[in-house]
Image: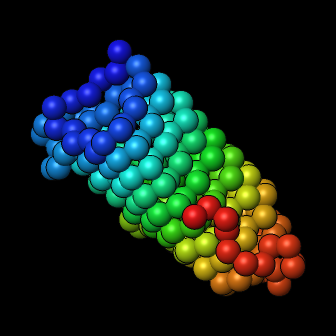
Amino acid sequence: MSTTHAHVVYGNNCTIDEAADVGYGGPEADAPTRIGDDATVRAGTIVYADVTIGDGFTTGHDAMIREDTTIGDDVLVGTKAVIDGTTTIGDHVSLQTNVYVPTNTTIGSNVFIGPGAVLTNDEYPIRTDNGLEGPTIEDGASIGANATLLPGVTVGENAFVAAGALVTEDVPPNTLAIGTPAKPQALPDPLEGPNQLA
């Protein structure tokens, strides 16, 4: 049976699978969980309190969305994907299986993030306290499978990060970032134009 806490506000036509937990964290949270119309939350998924989600939301199994997160319309959070809170995600976004999104990340609209991609937010983990700054992924960008983005980088509008790339510096708009470390180059013809997520 799914666990739905009293401080959850649902839109119309939502389907919450058994073993999903929506509103985790209890009424002591700053704000309730709000989920728009036509949501599907699959078994094993945990959505914390103080999360706001638009219409057409879908998860795979065992996804986790932490508090202080805002998600737009028509967003997919894939199986075992983790959004670690204090994050903003736009409309028409696809986070595939095993994507990791750290605290203090901004993801625009019409963005694709491939399976196993890892975004990071701590420049010197447990060595110094420089604060946490996640990446910014601008509208229309695509991140390939198993790519890694270092803290504070910006992936520009309609840019494409190749599978397995290590992004250590900003990626300019409308470019392809490829390699370890990733270097920008011109987008090949098949990659030009917007993502087809909307």
Name which quarter of the figure residue 65 lies in. Answer: top left
192 up-or-down from 41: above or below: below
Residue at image point 81% right, 80% down: 187
Q: Would you say 11 lies left or right of 58 here?
A: left
Residue at horizontal 63%, vertical 57%? Answer: 113
Q: What is the quadrant of the N terminus in the image?
A: top left
Whole-percent x, y for residue 95 in the image: 58, 51
Identify whether 144 is placed above or below 78.
below
Q: How far across and down, in percent of the image, does residue 158 sit?
A: 66, 77
Question: In the rendered view, how is the structure colored?
Answer: rainbow
- Measuring from the top left, give residue 19's x and y in whole percent: 41, 20
Give left or right: position of 41 versus 184.
left
Q: Name the residue: 67% across, 84% down.
A: 172
4 relative to 96 in the view: left or right: left
Q: Quadrant of the C terminus?
A: bottom right
From the viewer's perspective, is residue 113 above or below residue 171? above
**Residue 129 spot, x, y in % from top left:** 40, 62
Residue 86 in view here: no
